[in-house]
Image (cartoon, grey):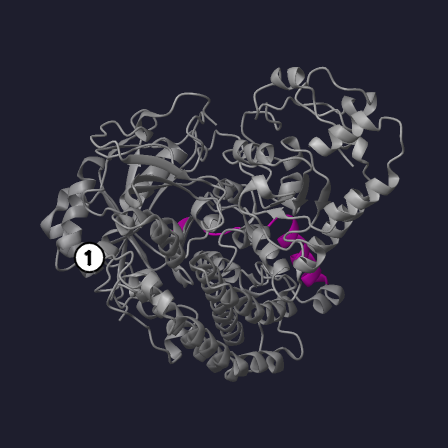
Amino acid sequence: MGLENVIAEALPEVLTTRLDSLINWARKSSLWPATFGLACCAIEMMNATTSRNDLARFGAEVFRASPRQADVMIVSGRVSRKMAPVLRRIYDQMPEPKWVISMGACATSGGVFDNYAIVQGVDKIVPVDVYIPGCPPRPEMLIHAVMMLQDKVMKESVRDRRDVPEEEARQAVVPGTLPVTDGSTARQNTLPESRPYTIASRHERRRSS
Amino acid sequence: MSEQLSTPDSTPSPLVTALQHEHPEWIGEVIYAFGETTIVVPREHIAAACSFLKTWPEGQFNFLADICGADRGVEEEPRFEVNYHLFSTTKYHRLRLKVVLNEEDTHVPSVTGVWRTANWHERETFDMFGVIFDGHPDLRRILLPDDWQGYALRKDFPLRGYEPYSLK
Amino acid sequence: MSSATIPPQFEIVDQPLDTQMTISMGPQHPSTHGVLRLELVLDGEMVVKATPDIGYLHTGMEKLFEYKKYQQGIVITDRMDYLNPLGNNLGYVMAAEKLLGLEIPTRAQTIRVLMCELQRIASHLVWLGTHALDIGAMTVFFYCFREREKILNLIEAASGGRLTPSYFRIGGLMMDLPAGFEFRCKQFLDDFPKAVDEFHTLLSGNRIFQRRTQGIGKISAEDAIDWGLSGPCLRGSGINLDIRRANPYCGYENYDFEVPTEPDGDVWARYMVRMRELKESHKISTQALARLQPGPVKADAPKVVLPDREAMKSHMDALIHHFLIVAEGFDVPAGEVYHPIEASKGELGVYIKSDGGPKPNRVHVRGPSFVNLSALPVMSEGEMVADIVAIIGSLDVVLGEIDR
């Protein structure tokens, strides 16, 4: 986003804790989810937004249908092989800053369905911030996950989300073909050469948090 | 009112007897089990049999509930079977027609001309087993992705598929 | 996903008018009730052709059944039609019981009827909430889910799971109803007719709702039977067919209820059928609750049905049976059955083919939404794009059942 670029260029060495707190507070208090209800967990997600467990009091006021207006993608339900490229495309269409909550056992790890048709964990396709177990998880668990995500958002810093320079972004790999890593990224803690598509941010490098 | 289609002491029901009078060449084998009647129909007659059963006053099977394929096993001969579950909305009785196929020749005449609901059921059977329905207006995969290799519900297709877990 | 080439059947080859446009009402859409993709060929705002493209939730459940013992398969059936999991459980369990030839005690049958009707009410409430939400009435969504929470509390009290209960077992139930269940159920059933009247006040007399649903998405009775529609979609076209009357199961022939039908065949008719079904399900539930008598809830088949925990802890043969059933499963006689039940969406048929072992050879579930959706092109020719949303809502499709 332009704000982070400007801050990074204008105030490179200045501590930005006050600014961080303000921006993070604003972001966490208005996390708008993108509707990505796939299967049974979607019904529990709908239950979390209705009057008994009201997700809107935590800032998730509207579930935006268009990913361009959403902050967090709650992947609720099993992701089949046919749906996986669509999921990646929706994730790519979301503007930064964005987060992903993987709701339910099927989104986290394939769940009950260890077979040919289901992607065994949505973190093979998109980077996930919060995992929720359960089949389906209770709406209270989803609210807890949103609160955990809010805590995570509060810990970020504006300086981490710099944009990728344009030349580097143009050499990116085709969307939807995210190469598979074997965990070496987390060990190296450097920008991996095989993925020019990623943003060099501490947030993205932590694949399994 | 529910009509008993098969008698417990496995004497042929009146429906099957009447059908045997009309068209004996359609009846390959009759199985009575668990309160259900199954007629094994030779492959080339299935469309004619379905069309007859739909308009026949004794049958009036105007509702096709389901077309279901099955794979008996890799070693079995014949290997595949296609079950047609028929139901009559006026007489409330049910019937199952079965077509058995060998592995090499998996062509069956399509019954979409008889009941239009067969369209999607036959597409699903094709998708899962590779049974080809001749005369189907639009036979292509329905549940699996369009470029999927292999037929998923065959017994020699592994449960976890062939591709590695991760997407490339 | 295929990379660059579009399969030929997706290209509209002859386009005499330049005004036609093919758009994809994609898998991620707030009104498609799941991951359904529609290929719409539009002429301006009017739909020339609408083709559903399904498979985005295909889970390979039918293949999974072949690798799991019979009692393990019950858990998978929950996830098919996830709005009516008890109905799915019932279909699978009754088909297996037909193969085994088990006799289910009366109390178990009564509880099955009660839970299925409660589940039918819950499923129709979700339908009503999302249908109204798509058409624009947001309040009804919240009211419906408020009522649904009460039902989910009841189901959770009985089985432990709100959305995936797996309450029925082959041979009866998982366990008996907890203490206080009947009181809470009666409380809910006493308050429910007022809620239905509230929905009628909000929607049925609403001129906007009427204009958006009357005359839209018509399908005639012959077409409905030809396309295999069942359930409220068929009854909305005037055909009086209910599997609970046609091929009764679980003692349904002893209950006093009507089968609502409407003659028109449009969205409004299907809406009215389901609203009246809410009242009928309420009637059946009240009757079932009144009929509950103490008794066993599991069939008398020690090789198939798990013994009670106390018996297992004190008797050796019960322990052995428990161990064998859980570890190795029970052998089911060879043969095939097709058992249809009336789920909330239509005729849910379960076909089980057994080869004599503890795992089925083939399980096929005929999902009513699968067949109901295939009639969408017929219903939506000539309608506006905004009406497609209303038509999909009236078909009450659940993608988990369609794609399995």
Question: Percent x, y for residue A154?
Answer: 81, 44
* Side of A192 relative to C35 (left or right): right
Question: Percent x, y for residue B18?
Answer: 13, 56
Residue C367 against residue A173 in the figure, above or below:
below
**To which residue does mark 1 refer?**
C222
Magenta stretch contains residue C335? yes
Can residue C255 be seen here? The reply is yes
Per the rendered image, the range of residues in magenta is C316-336
* Side of C309 relative to C75 (left or right): right
Residue lying at the far front of the rendered structure: A10
Residue lying at the far left of the rendered structure: B22
Please, what secondary structure does the residue beneath circle 1 have?
helix
Residue C251 or residue B167, whichever sits in front: B167
Rate crowding at label 1 as few (under 14), some (14 to 19) or many (20 or more) other CA atoms within 10 Å.
some
Residue C260 against residue A167 in the figure, above or below:
below
Question: Percent x, y for residue C258?
Answer: 34, 77
| Residue at horizontal 52 percent and vertical 55 percent from the top | C82
Question: Percent x, y for residue C66?
Answer: 51, 42
Residue C238 or residue C241, whichever sits in front: C238
